[in-house]
Image (cartoon, grey):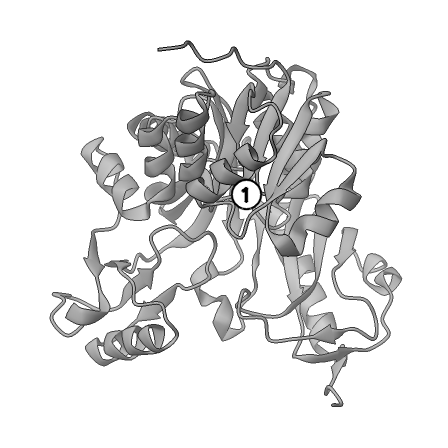
Amino acid sequence: MAQPAPPVDGRILLLGLTPLASARALARHGVSLVCAVKPEDADAARRSGLLDESVVVSNPANAEQVVSAVMRTGADIRFSAVATASEGPMVTTSLVGRALEVPSLSLPCALALHDKFLQKQLVAQAGVPTATAGIVHYSDADMVAVDEYPVVIKPFTDAGPRGTAVIRTRNDLRTFVSAAKAEGAPGPWLVEEYVEGDAVHIDGVIREGELMFISVGRYLDKPIDITHGDLYGSVLLDPQHNEQIYSAARVMVTRSLHALGHRDGVFHLEAFLQANQLMFGECSGRVSGGQIPDVIQQKFGVDLHDEWARCVLGTSSGMHDRASSDQSYGWMHLSAPAGTLSARSTGELELLPGVVEVDLEVAAGELVSDDSQDAVPRVASVQVAADTYDEVSERLIEVASWLASRAWTAPHQG
């Protein structure tokens, strides 16, 4: 059998262009990027100026489509790595890497980082506390054995709170499953016990099995509750003022990542905080969403997107030059009722106490719709800073109250 051609240094096959900040980080290292993108993202991919080539596929998480599209180009199929910064194509990177005989994430690690049921089994076997979990399909919803309610039902592989619900009765479970079946999504789903305690996110970098950096943030409200009008955002905890929590986080993260086989990369782990003790929720091998990476860079001087790119390329970490801030930082998504966004400038928000950055996602006059991809229609994100954790939390609540008192949207006409 002929030997495969050697990889081409600095040529990366990237599955999906989101988040764009990660693709930019790769491009800053001078690599050649070939990206598999959805048709609706093709124009944005070309306009980004980051790619040497793009291949259009209906789903970058489909290994057959990606390999076929790359082969159809007739171009050089040698790469130095196959990677993704998105949740969906995580396992696909491993399958495509094997198909093209290119370095990529190992299949066991990719599965462990993507499948929430599998990862709970692995971390539990490693002695990490986590919620008990089971599996339910629409055909056995009436027969599933749930000893105690409430429980949480969620997809096995989706990122964020989308598709996740708190089920408080057996009838709630049947209603949820029936509705999902009617929408063409018959499961199966992960069903796990509802865990009390504050929801926290733990983000960081691991290289060669060694924990290089860790950040802990507490959510304003549990992400699974945002459909009920709660606040979707978080505030970072300062390591010096929360030594016990950070110590517990380092132990849990190290054990969890070793159990998942994740030795090189970034991570975003969600957990529940109960009296300075942590219970594992779920973990992914990517940079977190929201404004979490932005406030981490503000607080700790660590660019998680750049660290992800360095892990993909196998180069050394860039964290040796980081400088931490004594201030506290937090972020929040700002929602609005569906309708047409009325004229409001980012300048109004930026003048509020503590606000350091505003990212307006919908321009004045544009339609804010009930997007099924988001639990609550989002119009902007905001980052705030203050001297203490409590001050940041208070300022975020003040921003939310300020917005609630203003008519950001008017009913859509026609």
**Rendered location of residue 67, percent (x, y):** 48, 36
**Rendered location of residue 126, percent (x, y):** 22, 30
Say if 244 sits above or below 411 in the image: above
- Residue highlighted by disc 1: 288
Dividing the picture into quadrants, the one containing residue 211 is: top left
Say if 60 sits above or below 39 in the image: above
- Nearest the camera: 301 or 24? 24
**Rendered location of residue 252, percent (x, y):** 34, 32
Badge 1: how crowded within 10 Å, few (<14), some, or many (20+)?
many
How many marks the image carries: the answer is 1
Residue under the image location 30 percent in, 67 percent down: 186
Residue under the image location 72 percent in, 34 percent down: 51
In the rendered image, the quadrant that contains the N terminus is top left
Say if 229 sits above or below 115 in the image: below
Residue under the image location 51 percent in, 50 percent down: 59
- Nearest the camera: 87 or 161? 87
Q: Secondary structure at mark 1?
A: loop
On screen, residue 217 versus residue 121, left or right, reads right
